């Protein structure tokens, strides 16, 4: 117990010594308050500057140039220049400091000279492009937006709001112009009657006429389909018969060829037969002449001298009577033979049967040649007609398919028109339609307001913040606390130089004794920052005490971490403190969600004190959930508990290094000061 009292007495002695030394110097007191106040001012200024950066009070002084080169257009007899209407609308808009200039070039000149943060230019064809849908051209009109990012990176993000403002104005103007023109019943129902109800009746009649016409067209298509199908059947059957016709023609040509061969052979036979007949006639004539010469006109005497009649008929020979009979017979035969030969010669000379027969056969050959040529021509025509018939069959098939498709389309159109007519009939009896027509006639402005924003977005804010600055307060408050701790260890030394005053002082006693002054400055910074946030700036806070407690524990961790680094490592510890602060500022998720930061920061995020300090403060500003606040407080206390033994341990381990570093630093300082 006495040993513990001695240790605490040494710690108290160091604390009293530090307080006494500071109280004797006004400059030291001013520096201490400066260390506490400067980070507070940094936090307050940043919170105020981020209080409501996107409200009209903050953006109304940002200059944005606007120029319209729109030439306008005509819509349903109305001269419409949407660019001029936008300009007039923006003149009554006070969310931005609009600067209206004459041309695109003037906008660009002002941007390059730095007079404007941004610029908007409405092109010459804007109105015509916006109403291009009336001609079937769905062209999206564009407004040129110039962004001067050199002037201020944050301002360019704020001025982006001008884009949505102009876009909303354009949509509203467009709807207003269209609805205003459509509200004119003469334009809306021209050609359909002057009254909406009568127009709907007329529309029903027209739809009925269209249905009748479509039914007629469907019937015609069905008839045409039947005709083309029948023709297709005929051409298909004909195509099937053509191979038989071709085979028949081929066989005919073969038969003709055989007949020609036979005629050629027969002509040779006729010539040979005619020659044989003439030779036979000549031989017969010669024979008769020799016979006449032999008989000498006396056939019986000649016969007696030549033929041994006695031997033939007996010793008596032939009688005279028999001789006369023989002579008569000879004369008759000889006469008939002569007459036959003469007649045969006359027939051969007069008829020329062989020449005529040959000529006939030659004529027949020529006829067969002509017939063969004709059949060949017919065969070529058949082949050509087969190809034509095939093409015609294909065309008929396509035509049949097209007719069937057209019939299906017309049936679909008929069904569609029937549905439209049904809808029109529903409209005729609809009270809602009647109300809309009355609204278009009597309250165009109300209809435009509704159409420009037909659905409202109901925003339910979870852990709602009254001001953007309240949401940024945790980050800048913790940053001020850590900046104060870093400035303290940079301007004041954590080591006791005059050890003779405390001969029994241990490392632990030295650590806690000198830490008090750093702790006090850190707590003063936390308290002043919290009070300024609550009562000077007026941030939103549901529990001021817990807000201060989170700041106080954040300061405890910040001062212990920075103090331990410098206590253990000296100048190297100061550099390490700066690195830790930079990493936490960049990767704590105070300004951007941690998910948007590089992977290294997402990994380090879980061990950063900034995270738990800010989350604890957010619980008191926006509302708490499921003990998150106390979980964060416990983590901060754990970090503080780890920082103390870590600092003492590192001091003991690194003491030789620290001694050499201090000696080197002293020599360097002596050289720089001339000895």
Image (cartoon, helix red, strand yellow):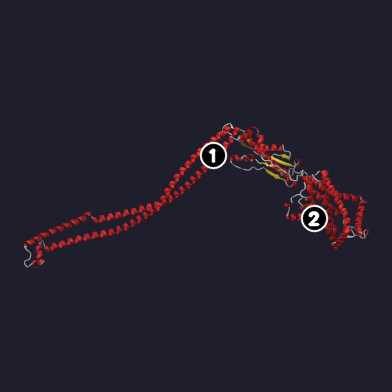
The x and y percentages for residue 643 are 83, 57
Q: Name the residue under label 1.
A: 418
Q: How crowded is mark 1: few (under 14 residues within 10 Å), some or many (20 or more)?
A: some
Q: Which residue is drawn at 58% across and 31% down?
A: 195
Q: Can residue 321 be seen in this view?
A: yes
Name the image quarter holding the C terminus.
Answer: bottom right
User: Quick check: 78 left or right of 3?
Assistant: left
Q: Which residue lies furthest to the top in this view?
A: 194
Q: Which of marks 2 and 1 is in front?
A: 1
463 on left or right of 436: right
Viewer-closest of 607 and 672: 607
Instruction: State the residue position of label 2.
Output: 580
Cα–Cα gap, marks 2 and 1 = 76 Å
> Callout 1: helix, strand or loop?
helix
Residue 160 in the image: above or below residue 597: above
Name the spot of residue 266 as percent of width and height, x first: 28, 58
Callout 2: SS: helix
Tell me if residue 79 comes above or below residue 306 in the rendering: above
């Amino acid at each position: 117990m006495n040993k513990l009292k001695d240790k605490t007495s040494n710690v108290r002695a160091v604390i009293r010594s530090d307080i006494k030394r500071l109280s004797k110097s006004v400059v030291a007191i001013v520096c201490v308050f400066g260390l506490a106040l400067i980070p507070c001012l940094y936090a307050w200024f940043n919170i105020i500057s981020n209080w409501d950066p996107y409200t009209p009070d903050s953006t109304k002084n940002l200059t944005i140039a606007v120029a319209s080169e729109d030439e306008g257009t005509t819509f349903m007899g109305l001269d419409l220049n949407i660019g001029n209407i936008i300009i007039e609308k923006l003149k009554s808009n006070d969310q931005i400091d609009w600067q209206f200039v004459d041309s695109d070039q003037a906008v660009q000149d002002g941007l390059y000279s730095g007079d404007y943060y941004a610029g908007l230019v409405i092109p010459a064809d804007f109105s015509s492009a916006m109403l291009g849908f009336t001609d079937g051209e769905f062209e999206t009109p564009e407004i040129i937006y110039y962004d001067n990012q050199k002037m201020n990176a944050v301002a360019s993000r704020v001025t982006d709001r001008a884009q949505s403002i102009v876009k909303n104005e354009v949509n509203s103007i467009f709807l207003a112009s269209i609805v205003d023109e459509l509200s004119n019943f003469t334009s809306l129902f021209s050609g359909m009657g002057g009254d909406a109800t009568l127009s709907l009746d007329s529309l029903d009649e027209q739809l009925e006429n269209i249905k009748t016409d479509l039914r007629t067209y469907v019937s015609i298509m069905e008839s045409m389909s039947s005709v083309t199908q029948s023709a297709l059947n005929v051409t298909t059957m004909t195509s099937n018969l053509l191979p038989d016709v071709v085979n028949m023609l081929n066989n005919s040509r073969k038969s003709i060829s055989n007949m020609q061969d036979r005629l050629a052979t027969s002509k040779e036979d006729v010539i040979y037969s005619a020659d044989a007949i003439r030779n036979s006639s000549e031989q017969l004539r010669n024979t008769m002449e020799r016979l006449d010469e032999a008989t000498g006109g006396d056939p019986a005497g000649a016969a007696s001298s030549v033929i041994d009649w006695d031997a033939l008929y007996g010793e008596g020979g032939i009688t005279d009577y028999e001789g006369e009979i023989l002579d008569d017979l000879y004369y008759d035969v000889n006469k008939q033979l002569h007459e036959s030969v003469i007649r045969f010669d006359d027939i051969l000379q007069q008829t020329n049967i062989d020449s005529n027969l040959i000529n006939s056969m030659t004529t027949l050959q020529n006829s067969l040649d002509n017939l063969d040529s004709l059949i060949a021509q017919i065969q070529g025509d058949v082949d050509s007609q087969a190809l034509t018939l095939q093409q015609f069959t294909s065309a008929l098939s396509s035509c049949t398919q097209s007719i069937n498709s057209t019939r299906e389309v017309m049936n679909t159109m008929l069904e569609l028109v029937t549905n439209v007519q049904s809808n029109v009939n529903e409209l005729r009896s609809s009270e809602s339609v009647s109300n809309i027509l009355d609204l278009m006639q009597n309250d165009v402005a109300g209809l435009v307001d509704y159409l420009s924003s037909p659905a409202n977005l109901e925003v339910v804010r979870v852990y709602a913040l009254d001001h953007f600055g309240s949401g940024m307060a945790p980050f800048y408050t913790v940053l001020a606390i850590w900046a104060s701790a870093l400035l303290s260890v940079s301007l004041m030394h954590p080591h006791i130089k005059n050890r003779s005053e405390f001969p029994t002082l241990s490392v632990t006693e030295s650590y806690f004794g000198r830490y008090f002054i750093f702790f006090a400055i850190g707590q003063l910074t936390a308290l002043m920052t919290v009070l300024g946030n609550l009562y000077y700036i007026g941030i939103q806070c549901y529990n001021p005490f817990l807000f201060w407690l989170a700041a106080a524990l954040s300061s405890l961790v910040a001062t212990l971490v920075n103090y331990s680094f410098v206590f253990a490592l000296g100048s190297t510890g100061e550099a390490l403190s700066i690195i830790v602060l930079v990493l936490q500022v960049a990767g704590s998720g105070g300004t951007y969600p941690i998910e948007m930061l590089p992977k290294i920061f997402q990994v380090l995020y879980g061990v950063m004190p900034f995270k738990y300090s800010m989350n604890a403060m957010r619980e008191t500003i926006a509302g708490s959930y499921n003990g998150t606040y106390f979980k964060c407080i416990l983590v901060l206390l754990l970090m503080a508990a780890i920082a103390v033994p870590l600092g003492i341990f590192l001091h003991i381990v690194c003491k030789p290094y620290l001694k050499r570093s201090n000696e080197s630093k002293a020599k360097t300082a002596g050289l720089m000061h001339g000895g």
